[in-house]
Image (cartoon, helix red, strand yellow):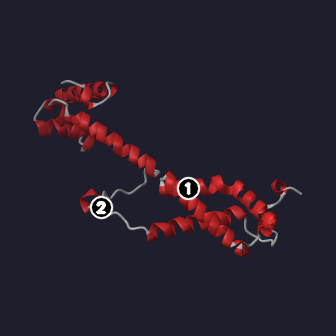
Amino acid sequence: MTYENMTDFELVKKSMSTDKTDSNNAFAEIVGRYKNLIYSIILRMTNDTEEANDLAQDVFVKVYRNLDKYQPEYKLSTWLMKITTNHVIDSRRKKKWDYVPLDDITNEISAEGTPEDIYIKKEQDEILSKAVSVLPEIYKVPIVLYHRQGLSYQEIAEITDEPLSKVKNRIFRGRKILKGILLQGGVGFYVV
């Protein structure tokens, strides 16, 4: 029977055998089967390819040393994922954390989705804010009051002391200008 055809449990048993060649080959098969899984978990947790490579090696050393603790009633992949996540968490605890000023921390409830989604939304908000900042005042004020503050057309008309039709018109024109700014590649390419 070749190593590729063995079950995970058979590979674990062979990896603990006294025959070094058998042991090394069996463990190499385990590594081959699960290296991508382990690496991807670590990379998602650390977002650093160099650190992910180092931690993946550490995980497989830890796995090899603890093969005798594997219980065959559980899937090997589950056991490996548990070791991996615990190892990454432990390594993070041991690292010294960079301190961030409290002013830089935003208290947002992350109901929007993944950290990547939140980052993209924040980046889009910054681009949009820069674009709004170059709008002429007559368009900027109603756009900000309507879209950022959530006021109605009527409330904006009362605040600016302008007719309702003029408020609607300025919001419409302001949006067109913003669209032009954003389509032209951002704030730096638009001349008011």
The answer, for residue 121, to whether it is visible in the render is yes
Q: Is residue 131 left or right of residue 71?
A: left
In percent of width and height, residue 47 lies at 48, 53
Tell me the CA gap for discs 2 and 1: 27 Å
Q: Is residue 58 left or right of residue 191?
A: right
Q: Is residue 110 left or right of residue 168?
A: right
Judge by depth and name the residue closer to the eye, 140 or 120.
120
In percent of width and height, residue 12 lies at 77, 67
> What is the secondary structure assignment of the residue under circle 2?
loop
Judge by depth and name the residue closer to the eye, 5 or 136.
5
Report the residue that reaches farthest toward the left: 161
How crowded is the residue under tag 2: few (<14 C-alpha within 10 Å), some, or many (20+)? few
Q: In the rendered view, would you say 185 is above or below 145?
A: above
Residue 142 lies in quadrant: top left
Q: Which mark is first along the chain, 1 or 2?
A: 1
In percent of width and height, residue 134 lies at 19, 32
The N terminus lies in which quarter of the figure?
bottom right
Residue on which disc 2 sits: 100
Task: Tell me the residue at 73%/75% (across/down).
Answer: 68
Task: Tell me the residue at 45%/48% (across/down).
Answer: 116
Amino acid type, mark 2: Val
The C terminus lies in which quarter of the figure?
top left
> What is the secondary structure assignment of the residue under circle 1?
helix
Amino acid type, mark 1: Asn
* Rendered image: mark on residue 53: 1
Judge by depth and name the residue closer to the eye, 37 or 17.
17
Residue 11 lies in quadrant: bottom right
